[in-house]
Amino acid sequence: MHPAFTAQATSAARADKYVGALPFLLGSGLLGTIGVFVHMAGAGALTTAWFRCVFGLAGLTVWMLARGQGRALVLSRSTAPLALAAGSLIVLSWVLFFAAIERTSAGMAVVLFHIQPMWVLLLGAVWLHERSSRQRLVSILFAMGGLVLATGVLEHNASASSPAAQAGYWWGVAFCLIGSICTAFATVMTRRLGPMPTGVLAWWQCAVGAAVLWVWPMQQGWPAWGASWFWLAGLGLIHTALAYSLIYAGMARLPTGRIAVFQFVYPAVAILIDWLYFDRRLGSLQLVGIVIMGVAIWTAERDGRPWRQQKAR
């Protein structure tokens, strides 16, 4: 190939990476501010999840129609059961996430939810019979060790908080872990669905949540009209429709290895917001645990990925 064409191809590839990185990082950064919106909305976990689904559904519908992908929202008989089941699990994980924020903090909840890739590796081995290398198994063990430190088990028990507050904190930790497992199951289910147009699964999970959770605000009462609705609308339009659209657009142009690294922008921003806005600071051992988790997950994600195989060719 002529050097001029090679230089142009290299330049185009670099530009494409930057074009993919910017929307992905922006979307992840937006997700990191979710704790402020949940706090300012002042609604219960189920009500908050329902509003996120309704406004997210509206935003994603506009986005899908604008891209001319309205027909892609129609599921076939073979894809509908798995897509609806995965959507239900994601909605359940949202409810658990919002309940965990009330008991711990947004930063802590986001960090604990990011153990989900480890559950995916384990489920892939058990359910999909995917072989895991020794490096991945070691990464899982290190990630679990980091998870133990990140929960604050060595620091929180020694704190001066009341027994009731400590019990609430650990309930929040449990909600995070259960929610991350739900998300992992949903991820494995989507693997069985095969390739689908971007945004279809997110649209259906919002549709499922809107259809199932409406009973709760109807029975418990609607939030007072005003600022609360503004913040709840932001959860759906900003933290679901806009953030997911940006992340999906970036993922389409990024190799898996960079996605594995960039995904930690979300918890990093959430921890920063916790510190600046809520004055909540993690202990030193918790920060060490988060770093261990991040490195372990990044290592596991890189191991055996197609982009490494292509590089070796």
Image (tube, rainbow, N blue to C red):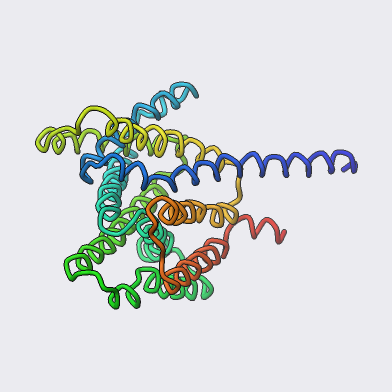
Percent position of residue 164, x then y: 17, 66
Percent position of residue 18, x then y: 66, 43
Residue nearest the viewer, comparing 284 with 142: 284
Residue nearest the viewer, comparing 193 with 98: 98
Q: Who's the residue at 22% across and 27% down the image? A: 225
Residue nearest the viewer, comparing 33 with 133: 33
Identify the image quadrant of residue 257.
bottom right
Percent position of residue 78, x then y: 33, 39
Describe residue 138's horizontal placement relative to residue 96 as left or right. Answer: right
Q: Who's the residue at 64% across and 59% down the image? A: 308
Label tally:
0
**Residue 250 visible within the image:** yes
**Residue 77 visible within the image:** no
Identify the image quadrant of residue 161.
bottom left
Q: Who's the residue at 29% across and 31% down the image? A: 227
Describe residue 210's horizontal placement relative to residue 60 as left or right. Answer: left
Describe residue 165's horizontal placement relative to residue 298 as left or right. Answer: left
Q: Quadrant of the C terminus?
A: bottom right
Residue nearest the viewer, comparing 45 with 93: 45
Q: Is residue 230 above or below residue 66?
A: below
Q: Quadrant of the N terminus?
A: top right
Q: Is residue 153 above or below residue 9?
A: below
Q: Is residue 183 above or below residue 79?
A: below
